[in-house]
């Protein structure tokens, strides 16, 4: 357990940060899920709109340190490829 004041403060700060990151990650997953549900339903227009909203959320996760840059790029790329396939 933390003994020094600095270590105790760090524990409190890490807990707050973990809560914020958890909500950010959950929000990103929600946006990605909307794209996937639209794809499963076969609704190309809805999928395209959902992707347009999900992309900035993924990149915001990168700037906030929740996701790695390449992870977000990979997810966007794969979703875009699936949306394009259903549109064609």
Image (tube, rainbow, N blue to C red):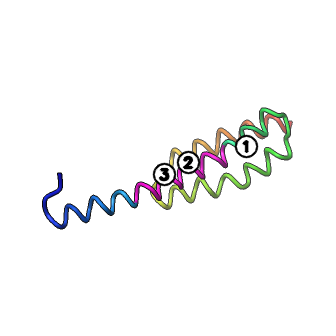
Q: Nearer the viewer, mark 3 or mark 1?
A: 3
Q: Measured along the vertical axis of the image, is residue 29 above or below residue 17? A: above
Judge whether residue 48 is colored magenta: no
Residue 4 figure quarter? bottom left
Front-most of residues 15 and 61: 15
State the mark number for residue 22.
3
Span of residues in magenta: 17-32
Residue 87 figure quarter? top right
- The residue that label 2 is drawn on is 72
- Horizontally, is 51 left or right of 10 in the view? right
Most prominent secondary structure in the magenta stretch? helix
- Horizontally, is 34 left or right of 75 in the view? right
Q: Where residue 72 sits: x, y (%)? A: 55, 48
Secondary structure state at the residue bearing disc 2: helix
| Residue at 13% across, 59% down | 3
Q: Earlier in the sequence, mark 2 or mark 3?
A: 3
Q: Measured along the vertical axis of the image, is residue 33 above or below residue 7? A: above
Front-most of residues 30 and 70: 30
Q: Where residue 26 sits: x, y (%)? A: 56, 49
| Residue at 33% across, 58% down | 14
Q: Where residue 35 sits: x, y (%)? A: 73, 43
Q: How many marks?
A: 3
Q: Where residue 83 sits: x, y (%)? A: 77, 40
Front-most of residues 42 and 76: 42
Q: Which of marks 2 and 1 is nearer the N terminus?
A: 1
Q: In the displayed image of the protein, which residue is found farthest to the left?
A: 3
- The residue that label 1 is drawn on is 35
């Amino acid at each position: 357990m933390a003994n020094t004041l600095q270590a105790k403060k760090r524990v409190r700060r890490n807990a707050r940060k973990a809560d914020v990151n958890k909500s950010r990650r959950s929000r990103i997953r929600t946006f990605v899920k909307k794209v996937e549900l639209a794809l499963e339903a076969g609704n190309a227009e809805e999928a395209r709109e959902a992707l347009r909203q999900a992309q900035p959320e993924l990149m915001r996760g990168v700037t906030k340190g929740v996701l790695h840059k390449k992870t977000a790029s990979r997810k966007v790329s794969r979703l875009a490829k699936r949306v394009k396939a259903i549109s064609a």
